[in-house]
Image: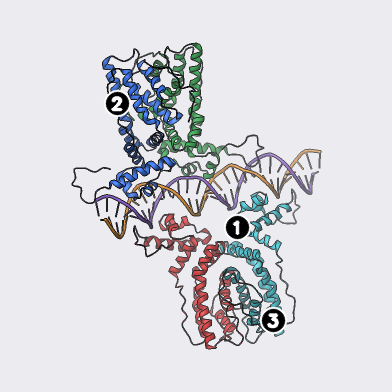
Chain colours: A cyan, B red, C blue, D green, E orange, F purple
Amino acid sequence: VPTDPQAPRRGRRRSEESRAAILAAALDLVTEAGFAALTVEGIAARAGTGKQTIYRWWPTKADVLAEALASRAALDVTVADHGSYAADLRAFLTDTFRLGREAWIAETLRALMAQAQLDPAFGERFRASFTGARRDALHAVVDRAAARGDLPPRPASPGTVPDLVFGVLWYRILVTHGPLDDALVEDLVGVLAGDGRRRSSCGDPFQRE
Amino acid sequence: VPTDPQAPRRGRRRSEESRAAILAAALDLVTEAGFAALTVEGIAARAGTGKQTIYRWWPTKADVLAEALASRAALDVTVADHGSYAADLRAFLTDTFRLGREAWIAETLRALMAQAQLDPAFGERFRASFTGARRDALHAVVDRAAARGDLPPRPASPGTVPDLVFGVLWYRILVTHGPLDDALVEDLVGVLAGDGRRRSSCGDPFQRE
Amino acid sequence: VPTDPQAPRRGRRRSEESRAAILAAALDLVTEAGFAALTVEGIAARAGTGKQTIYRWWPTKADVLAEALASRAALDVTVADHGSYAADLRAFLTDTFRLGREAWIAETLRALMAQAQLDPAFGERFRASFTGARRDALHAVVDRAAARGDLPPRPASPGTVPDLVFGVLWYRILVTHGPLDDALVEDLVGVLAGDGRRRSSCGDPFQRE
Amino acid sequence: VPTDPQAPRRGRRRSEESRAAILAAALDLVTEAGFAALTVEGIAARAGTGKQTIYRWWPTKADVLAEALASRAALDVTVADHGSYAADLRAFLTDTFRLGREAWIAETLRALMAQAQLDPAFGERFRASFTGARRDALHAVVDRAAARGDLPPRPASPGTVPDLVFGVLWYRILVTHGPLDDALVEDLVGVLAGDGRRRSSCGDPFQRE
DNA sequence: GGCTAAGCGAGACGGTACGTCCCGTCTTTGC
DNA sequence: GCAAAGACGGGACGTACCGTCTCGCTTAGCC
């Protein structure tokens, strides 16, 4: 609930110590006991703050967690030009999947996606600030390839490409808990750009957990 | 919490009326107000039963909802042989996506997947009874194609195919709320079997809600 | 809920084993965990019977406990003639107080008296079957003394005597948990019959527990 | 659960409105439907408060009721000097029995005494705050008479006097529901101080209810 | 330098739902 | 027809958090 920064700002200023303590407490608690056990009271107690201070600055505990994640992980996406669709795609996927490999990030993403389903208002915020940005970036990569005439002979429709890419990513995070490794990157590059480097399958396709 | 059916069954039997009333109440409530507002007390009140009757037979309200879904929707997957990988895939996808097109089913699936993230024990159950069965079915389709030598020249590794298919499905259900239409089916058949019938794109890839 | 014993009694007869097991279980449980923790389900489980068997024969769990007490303790009062008011009183008090000295009986009496307050219907039953009988017996003793001209010069009114006697008894059982010893008997004999044998006070008058 | 009054009192203060509403609701409900039907939920609903507010300040509903009684009835005992043991005793008894004559007070006392038996921890509290204070006061009266040499020739031992007095009081409240009238006062004064004014018996000694 | 605003930790408040316990009843099988 | 078994509708329990609302205190402009 950020107020207008143009206002003359009278009175005591927001405490940066409290903000940091709250974000840290939220991350600690969610990794220790899971999002289901994450409560505003718990965060406040762990952070040594009052509950009101949390309600003053964040609409829900999921927003606290989302900001905590952003403050800890390098979430920004870069789409430098590597010369070809395959290379651009490979770079993008490698960069993106990197996040999902860290267990605490995957756990946090699971919690945020779950909450986005249960609380439509947060879902909208999450879509706008997180998943949307990534979709836009990938879309730029596809557009550049199309402009270069670099797309494979019979490509998936442009609107489906991000769904395929992020679909696999989230499906592995949410359902199979499978690895987000180079083999998967090459499978995707092969399927989408018609240029897979290696054929190293990741073995048993039914791995779970 | 099903008991051993071999036991001589003494005492009063489980009430089928109560079971049906509970499942119906759960579905009613979740479509009326969403899963976040679904409570065990609410289900019991609506169904005209005691809370204990719910706790006696289901470990969590998510399990109630999952059984309610199964009792209403034709969830079983059939994998008849249509002669070719492309045809089999097209049939499987059409059959599977059909479910996601009904709004109440999609809403319910969103809730169940969310709960599977928040409650790992339920997640395991959901994976075993729901997503796992579908993965196995699709895996059978791929195996059959491989046995026929019907796979495209440079296929995705077999373990990745289900992740691609169900990834797109769940991603549209959970994130973009995009359509699960024939265009998507053809995109997937084209990408996976190298045989897309039409090139009818679904237009704006950023549709949401 | 005893039925008419004159009836021809068709069908299976009441199980004496169950009755005894239920009474024993009730006493066991009340001495182990107190009356507050005594439940019909607990009694049935401990006794190895069904709950219905209890509900069939006793109106409340307090009635079970009362019958259990009667089956274990010699509750009948005898009022033999000892020749004088003082001697009769002394005998009656000694006989009556004997019960209150056994801890498990005192504990059970506490529970029954408490329940008699909370459940007026049981209170009526308890008064009729337990406290009333004792009052009648003591009243007979006083009447006999009056007929003999053996009452002290300025006696308490006849209706007050039982209240004094049983008042002290119950007050020590319920409130002070003080001893029901010979000193108390002599005090009462002295006060009521004008003939106390010894003046051995029981010391600190504020003993509790 | 009163906290240390020396503490600097941070945070919102206890709501006096809620406290009063809770006490009033408890008394209302207990007189309307009896203690057995008194529930914490009922008190909270009637008082318009949350249940937690009750649990925060009182350990059990019996403690709520005891405080409610204390807030409504003049429970404090005074032991002014009236010149003689008989006069002091008469004044004390008249003052004490007055409470038991009001039906709602007698009903409340029955409930509290019952609960004191079922919940030993509450029993201890009740003894310390209620019955103990009254015993101490009466003991002071007896001590004063002894110091004056005003005791009758063969008195009951000092420790037994309160048991006789409160025994009769509670026995009539709990068991016979008999009157706590002047006749009883004079009987007690006569028996204990050897100076009963009148010989007006209270008639049938077996009155019940 | 006092005045007025915030922000802060603390914690009580009215509420809602939790999952459990037990009530007293009903239904089933078996003796 | 009684008995053990056990599911049933119901109600209260005591707890955990919710989001809100005072409190006393601290920290900042602003007159």
State the mark number for residue A33: 1
In the image, residue D77 lies at what x, y percent?
50, 23
Left or right side of C68 for D10: right
Image quadrant in which you'd find residue D37 = top left
Q: Percent position (x, y) of residue D172?
A: 38, 27
Cβ–Cβ below 8 Å for labels 3 and 1? Answer: no
Instruction: Give the alpha-carbon distance from disc 2 to disc 3, as whole Å.
Output: 107 Å
Q: Nearer the viewer, residue B41 or A136?
A: B41
Which residue position holds label 2? Answer: C137
**How far apart, in angstroms, are the residues tagged by discs 3 and 1?**
41 Å
**Which chain hosts label 3?**
A
**Mark 1 nearby-residue class (10 Å; few <14, some 14–19, many ≥20):** few
Residue at 51% x, 87% y: name it. B84
The disc numbered 2 marks a residue on which chain? Answer: C
Residue D13 placed where, x, y %?
Answer: 61, 39
Mark 3 highlights which residue? A86
The amino acid on which the numbered mark 2 sits, given as a three-letter code, is Ala
- The amino acid type, in three-letter code, at marker 1 is Ala
Both on one chain, marks 2 and 1? no
Which residue corresponds to the image point at 51% horizontal and 21% vertical from the top-left? Answer: D78
